[in-house]
Image (spheres, helix red, strand yellow):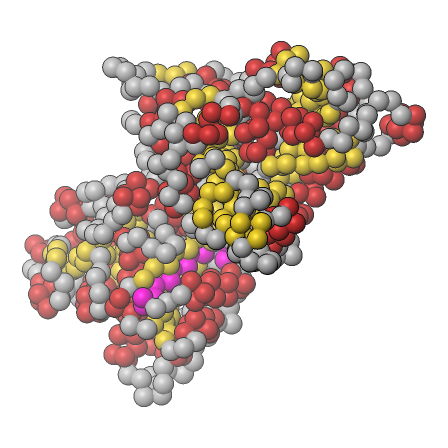
Amino acid sequence: MIENVTEKTEKIATPSRILLIGVGGMGINALGTIHGLPGDHPELVAIDTDGAVLKAASVPRRVQIGATLTNGQSTGGDVDLGRRSANNEFTKLRELFVDVDLVVLITGLGGGVGSGAAPVIAQTARDEGTLVISVAALPFPFEGDERIRLAEKALDLLRRASHAVVTMPNQYLLEDAADEASLKDAFRKADEQLGTGFGVLWKLLAQHNLINLDFISLKHMLETAGGVCTMVYAEGGGKSKARLVLNRIMNHPAIKGDNVLSEANGLLVGVLGSPDMTLMDVQDVMNGIAGAVHSNARRFMGAGIDASMRNRIGVMLLIGGKAEEPKAEPMAEPPRIVPIPVPEDRKPKRAEQREFEMPTTATKGRFKDVEPTIHEGEDLDLPTFIRRGMKLTR
Amino acid sequence: MATAPVVALEIGTSRVRALVGEEREDGYLMITGVGETQSRGVRKGDITDFDNALSCVEQVLNTAEEQSRVTINQVHVVLTGSHIQGTISRGTTPIMPPDSEITPEDIEAVMESARAISLGPERRTLHSIHQQFFVDDQEGVTNPEGMVGAKLSVSMLILHGVRNRIMNVLRVANTAGVETAGCAFAGLCSALAVLTPEQKENGCVLIDLGAGTTDYVVYANRCIALAGSIGVGGDHVTNDLAMVLNIPTGPAEKLKANLGVQIPDSDWQDQPVTIQPSGGFAGRTVRLADVDAIISARLDETLTMIYDHLRRNNLHNVMGAGIVLTGGGAKMKNMPEFVSSVLNMPCAIGRPLNVSGIATATEGPEYAAVVGMLKYGLRTSDGETQSMSLRNLVRRFLGR
């Protein structure tokens, strides 16, 4: 899976196996977008009950679940059927996660497979000892009250099953969309955000970089985040591409106007650029972002070169800590569609989201209050044993 | 008494030490007073708690004064910290008129031009050490005086550190009522204390494994080729054990001291290690292989960082005398074997040479830096005596 690994990288970090799983229609669509992106991508696996959906999927690896329960058809929005379908294929799913280090599970909540099967799949992966990040797209407000209620319930289950959940409240895409933006465009945009963002993360984890990002940093970041993350991706080209991309990040609808960045307790910045990207560009981006976060926030970063970027620079941000809720009500008028507001009491409680919070400085011990010793992007105060991904004998 | 006594002070991460010493007629260093205490208020070589550090310094100065029966007015201070870095600078000057003999003035001028490098406002130069001269691009000239040429160049190793961090250390000493007579980078001090002329001649790496930092000095081609400090030390080993095994720092420190690195034999893997209960900690049994893996990973990483620095400067193949390991970390079990296996060079423990007097300070590798500072201080001392002065007595009696 990992090519061109230098002697040094091999020594520092054990190669990580990463699976990108699309669960349900929306998740599989996202995989399709990722599959179509230029350059390499992680292993992709599509999971659904519907044989026709799987057949149409452009990804090579497909897993059908619940064929006997659904006759190979869709769940028709039946969450319970989705859940039972996944439970039925427990062994098949478990085999999928053997020797996998990280699973990024992408799904759209609100449907039967996304809401029912995704939490079961996440839990199965977690039980196998895999680190699980679930990426959940929430329904558009206009998709209806019932769907939003189901999505919130599923989100809660997914949070319990995963190490971290990145929510993608879809409506910000509409806010950003031009007047003539169709619904299909909005979905495609959401998929692209996910695909490119995690594509960057994967590339940084897999290759030898300017500033290395390792699996352990990601793990620390997720632990710091306490279960809830926001993912943002932006790119820019041209002469002042660093400034452009920074500007796009700061004005990204997912964080703009909110205190997501300034209240973050952890932050992972991944920068991927064309071969002509300079260290100054990277520094400009890093400095710009560092200036927007709280000084106490733990920061992790990686930067690498990717030939497929073609004179552009792409920046992905995984922001932890600010418990961001699926804000359903304050929405801009989506074109041609009338939004349905969600009652206040349906919003998930902040307290529930905090359940998974882990001590942020647990592994720094006596160095937690002093300036960290950073060498080539690595925090040397963290045990080498942990950074190298070593495990205690049993 | 051959020379006036000189005092060296080391405000280290794990220990604070003061040594009083003088040079005997036979060239040996005679240590007449030792003050030493557990350090508080220092992390990775930097002062983190001024008051705690101050009380440690006062304590060791008092002990050293009592033992040596001199009043300490001036100290030579050992400096460390990852902010201390080395930069190689080259200066050139034309010989006027061309092809005439090189004069001492020419040499001074070229060294001055090499020293004049811009370090930024927050840094200051600690040492500028000349490496070699070049006369009309003829390399490796040790003394160009009297040679004929059109152009004289010199390469210098400039060791510099962050001004405020250095000032913080010196301020502790000054607040304790003593003047700073001089200061020097710990790595250089250790080198001065433990290296033989042969080791320097053949090329070697001195590694001082302290609690807070790992300092290194590289001798190659008959000069100091590189030097630096990494903000990782024995404290990190202890912390790694405590964090990974989930045990308190105290037992972790004991594990490190008792076990060190392992030389694998037939059944060591499964050998259990019992950690005794202490102060609310219930005790635990861990496996020797795990302890070894945690310690080895950290040491391997730190040593590899030094090796990478050597390799980047193409010096990894010219270390005829290999590694000389010193500092408290050198006392860990099986260290020479381990270092030798990681860096693929011979490795020996470096202990202070040509020292006599109070026994403890003459023996252990952990005293390398402070003994070296003493030697350095004796070398640079202008012979001013440090005997009793009434003014000073009164000042100290009345409190700091």
Position in image of residue A110 (x %, y %): 28, 65
Q: Residue at x 59, y 52 (%)?
A: B110
Residue B187's place in the image compared with B108, above or below, is above
Question: Is any atom of residue B244 visible in this view?
Answer: no
Question: Is any atom of residue B345 visible in this view?
Answer: yes
Position in image of residue B307 (x %, y %): 39, 38
Task: Judge left or right: residue B154 versus residue A190.
Answer: right
Residue B114's place in the image compared with A328, above or below, is above
Position in image of residue B358 (x %, y %): 66, 12
**Total numbered badges shown on the rendered structure:** 0
Residue B320's place in the image compared with A294, above or below, is above
Task: Judge left or right: residue B356 versus residue B264.
Answer: right
Magenta stretch: dominant secondary structure: strand
Q: Residue at x 42, y 62 (%)?
A: A279
Which region is colored magenta? Answer: A264-275
Query: Depth check: B367 or B198 in front?
Result: B198
Query: Depth check: B304 or B226 in front?
Result: B226
Query: Depth check: A270 or A253 in front?
Result: A270
Q: Residue at x 13, y 66 (%)?
A: A57
Task: Judge left or right: residue A252 versus residue A127.
Answer: right
Query: Depth check: B87 or B104 in front?
Result: B104
Q: Residue at x 48, y 53 (%)?
A: B136
Position in image of residue A5 (x %, y %): 25, 49
Residue B70 magenta-highlighted: no
Classify the position of the C terminus of chain A by image quarter.
top left
